[in-house]
Amino acid sequence: AKAKGRNTFHFYSQELDAAANERLYIENELRIAIKEQQFKLHYQPQVNSESLEVIGYEALIRWYHPEQGFIPPDKFIHIAEATGLIVELGEWVLEEACTFSMQLQGVGKAGSMSINLSARQFKDDRLISTLADVLKRTKMPSHLLHLELTESMLMGDVEAAITQLHEIKKLGVALSIDDFGTGYSSLSYLKRFPVDMLKVDRSFVKDIPEDQNDMEITAAIIAMAQKLQLQVVAEGVETREQVDFLQKNNCYVVQGYFYSPPIAQSDVEAFCDALKQR
Ligand code: C2E
Ligand code: CA
Ligand code: CA
Ligand code: CA
């Protein structure tokens, strides 16, 4: 029994080692990747399903590692967050996305540009000056910049969060709550957060029209957003049935594979033109 116990321990410790090693590996590689610019942004269009116009884009980071190939954000964002590297990386994302947005505006394809903010960036004292600097440097109209935050980022120190949200709003930047409905129940706070938009999480949308509960929750979120005069974007929309359901429930702005996955910068203009022919 003793030997078995030792083996079991050994087994777990090897697993832990592997996880710790992978983490350490990613952390080291992240530092190199930032220096060597191994990152790219892809852009997922947000489409008005009625007019078939692109009303905005969400910037999503892509890491192409020279040996490992594509490393998805779910594998490294939390490590960048834990090590603080996200602050530098996030600044690059912001500048890159605003620069591309200006390019699109130059060819008559203006739209909002949504960027994901991590908890660490949101809480950082330098956020406001960084935002102001990037807006100035890129000449990005502030109202076209949308920052996506999650409920959990707002729920820890609610008063501090509200202060920070107001500071961001003073710059003229818009705010949206990402993955809405999956975090802590912030319904009682929602009215106090100066946000402009909610993004209905994909988990509620993906089983429409099969799941009656999900349909009711989605309809309720949309109705509540309208009462609070918030715009709504549905995420992860993959089928015509989902678009129809959302339209019937007064949600016209959708994002998801039904219209387009996140695409490379060089494909965005062609997508906008092709969409109008659909
Ligand atoms: P998110 O902000 O919720 O982004 C939506 C994710 O859903 C993206 O995954 C997108 O590619 C995927 N998606 C979009 N439409 C569909 C659909 O119709 N079906 C399905 N199955 N998936 C869809 P991605 O690009 O892998 O990003 C994952 C997460 O990583 C993001 O979730 C976001 O939390 C984070 N992330 C991505 N880029 C950044 C960034 O620049 N900064 C920060 N802080 N986080 C980022
Ligand atoms: Ca997002
Ligand atoms: Ca989301
Ligand atoms: Ca998410």
Image (tube, rainbow, N blue to C red):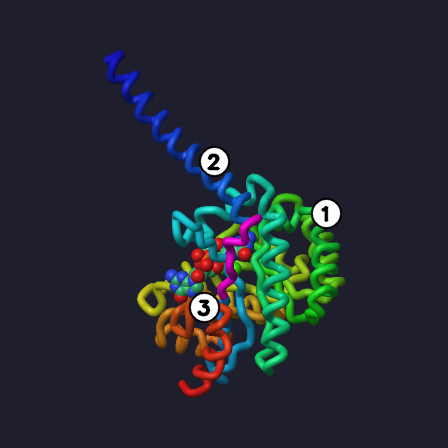
Task: For residue 54, say whether it is visible.
Answer: yes
Residue neighbourhood size for the residue with mark 1, other residues' Cα within 10 Å, grouped as few (<14), some (14–19), many (≥20): few
The local secondary structure at tag 2 comes to helix
Toward the viewer: 111 or 1?
Answer: 111
Picture coordinates of residue 210, whole percent (x, y): 31, 66
Residue at the limit of the structure toward the bottom, as seen here: 277
User: In terms of image quadrants, where is residue 172?
Assistant: bottom right
Q: Which residues are magenta?
A: 35-42
Picture coordinates of residue 50, whole percent (x, y): 48, 83
Picture coordinates of residue 65, whole percent (x, y): 44, 50
The CA span between labels 2 and 1 is 27 Å
Circle 2 residue: 24
Residue at 42%, 87% in the rendered image: 277
Kind of residue indicated by mark 2: Leu
Task: For residue 227, say whether it is visible.
Answer: no
Kind of residue indicated by mark 1: Asp
